[in-house]
Image (cartoon, helix red, strand yellow):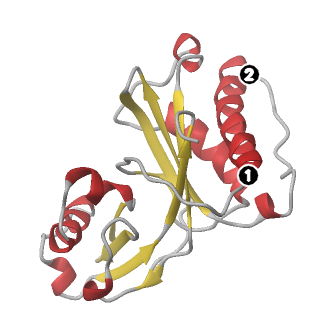
Amino acid sequence: MSLPQPSPVAVDSGEHAAGEFSSEERTQLLRLAHESILSALEGRDIPLDPPTTHLSEPRGAFTSLHLHGELRGCVGYVLAVSPVYRAVADTARAAAFEDTRFHPVTLTEASNLEIELSILSPPQPISPDAVEIGRHGLLISMAGRRGLLLPQVPTEHNWDRITFLEQTCRKAGLPLDAWQKGATIEAFTAEVFGDNQS
């Protein structure tokens, strides 16, 4: 059973696109992500009240940071634990300073970061046969372990459906065949956009 997490989780990322959020909303969210990181480095607060009703809707979100074309951090919330506007601000800071795979982002690096956001739909149970490459992200959990891969990951790596299921199990620290042996399988979609995408 999936429960909201008090802290973000690190995941792999890639690239994709969709269309629920307007161009203006995308710009607002990307600007917020940059400002959230910069304000943390400068020790100042920023307003986190959502500017629109749509951006106040609770959603899962991931922020991926890239520096000179290389991943610099990727952290997010699987489930909708806060309004999407606040989730973007929180995950941007977490990606910059709490992704244990990387050293914290510096003030010099902050101005050169390229940001990609993934806004998630709520995870829903799915049968393995219904998983669609390029459309679904996966969340697989079992025995207190949980792994997540965004929808763009299997496309980026040219994985088929079985490999995608196996690699999500691997991400959870589970045997590759756990998806066939009682693990909970949930799917979600993601709208992905970033500084270099229209």
Pointer 2 local density, CA inside 10 Å: few below 14, some 14–19, many at least 20: few
Identified by mark 1, the residue type is Tyr
Viewer-nearest of labels 2 and 1?
A: 1
Instruction: From the image, tell me which residue sits under label 2.
Output: 43
Viewer-nearest residue: 139 or 18: 18
Check the image and report above or below for 113 versus 162.
Answer: above
User: What is the total number of numbered labels drawn onto the structure image?
Assistant: 2
Q: Is residue 8 visible?
A: no
Viewer-nearest residue: 154 or 187: 154
Q: Residue at x 79, y 63 (%)?
A: 54
User: Nearer the N terminus, badge 2 or badge 1?
Assistant: 2
Instruction: From the image, tell me which residue sits under label 1.
Output: 85
Tell me where residue 192 appears, x and y as whole percent: 52, 52
For the residues labelled 2 and 1, the Cα–Cα distance comes to 20 Å
Check the image and report above or below for 56 versus 186.
Answer: above
* Image quarter hosting the N terminus: bottom left
Q: Is residue 183 left or right of residue 109?
A: left
Tell me where residue 113 appears, x and y as whole percent: 52, 24
Element carrying mark 1: helix
Disc marking residue 126 = none
Q: Is residue 82 left or right of residue 175?
A: right
- Residues marked 2 and 1 touching at CB (< 8 Å): no
Q: Is residue 107 left or right of residue 146?
A: right
Q: Residue at x 35, y 65 (%)?
A: 134
**Which of the 4 quarters of the picture holds residue 107?**
top right
Element carrying mark 2: loop
